Image: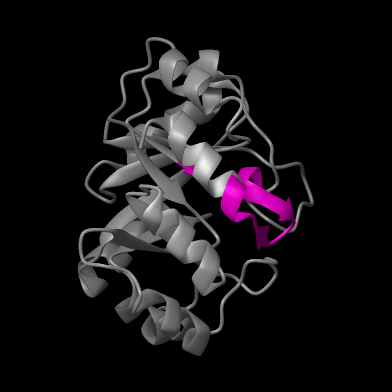
């Protein structure tokens, strides 16, 4: 069975839909420029609704120490974007959380970064590289060429992200063998606005 993470949840109703329809992971974004950003109190309320069998993932972009200190207790997994392997390793060691590092992919050469995170991360998240100057490192509905993963020897457990939705996720899993898929904008009706029906459709298509 493929695991599935619904990322960027912001309301009890959409969180409950993800839990009800079989998500293995739920994601809370702590990055103010994102339309999915959560303040700590809101995140705490959502986090408390999640049963112990489901992993809570905190999503961070090159986070400062103060943000981590305020929020990391609310999550089981720390997912970091735009950090070095050394920084990821430091976060993993000091906070004692499972740590995922996002690898931004556009070309085969981008995958070379993966090996450098052995010993620093527990999982790699392959996501589509956003255009130069983009405010967000992900959550923009972009996908990369999945054929880039053909024959690639993954140095760590991994997940597939970037441009997934209910129409293509089964294809993506069949094409790449992804053990875990991650969606955000693909289950939204507008940026930052999750849709309970799209969440249900995605999780059904992913076989979760």
Q: What residue is drawn where x is 58% and y is 24%?
A: 168
Number of callouts in the render? 0
| Residue 184 colored in magenta in the image | yes
Residue 196 position by quadrant: bottom right
Q: In the picture shown, does residue 193 fall above or below 175?
A: below
Q: Is residue 174 visible?
A: yes
Q: In the picture shown, does residue 164 fall above or below 182?
A: above
Question: Quarter holding the N terminus?
Answer: top left
| Residue 92 colored in magenta in the image | no
Q: Which of these two is toward me, 18 or 69?
A: 18
Residue 164 place in picture, x, y as percent? 58, 34
Q: How is the image coloured?
A: one colour
Residue 18 place in picture, x, y as percent? 44, 55
Question: Quarter holding the C terminus?
Answer: top left
Residue 136 place in picture, x, y as percent? 68, 56
Q: What residue is drawn where x is 65% and y is 74%?
A: 32
Q: Which of these two is toward me, 88 or 53?
A: 53
Residue 68 position by quadrant: bottom left
Residue 12 place in picture, x, y as percent? 50, 73
Which residues are the magenta region?
182-197
Residue 113 position by quadrant: top left
Q: Can residue 62 be seen in this view?
A: no
Q: What residue is drawn where x is 29% and y is 59%?
A: 55
Q: What residue is drawn where x is 51% and y is 18%?
A: 171
Q: In the picture shown, does residue 15 fall above or below 160?
A: below
């Amino acid at each position: 069975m493929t695991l599935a993470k619904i990322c960027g949840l912001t309301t009890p109703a959409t969180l409950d839909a993800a839990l009800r329809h079989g998500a293995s992971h739920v994601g809370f974004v702590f990055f103010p420029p994102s339309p999915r950003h959560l303040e700590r109190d809101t995140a705490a309320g959502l986090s408390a609704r999640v049963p112990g069998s489901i992993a809570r993932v905190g999503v961070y972009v090159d986070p400062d120490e103060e943000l981590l200190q305020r929020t990391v207790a609310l999550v089981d997994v720390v997912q970091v974007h735009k950090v070095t392997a050394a920084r990821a390793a430091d976060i993993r060691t000091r906070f004692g959380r499972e740590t995922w590092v996002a690898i931004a992919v556009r070309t085969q050469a981008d995958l070379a970064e993966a090996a450098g995170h052995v010993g620093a991360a527990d999982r790699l998240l392959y996501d589509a590289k956003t255009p130069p100057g983009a405010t967000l490192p992900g959550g923009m509905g972009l996908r990369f060429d999945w054929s880039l993963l053909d024959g690639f020897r993954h140095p760590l457990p991994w997940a597939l992200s970037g441009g997934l939705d209910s129409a293509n996720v089964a294809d993506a899993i069949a094409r790449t063998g992804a053990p875990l898929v991650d969606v955000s904008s693909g289950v939204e009706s507008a940026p930052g606005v999750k849709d309970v029906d799209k969440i249900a459709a995605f999780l059904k298509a992913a076989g979760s």
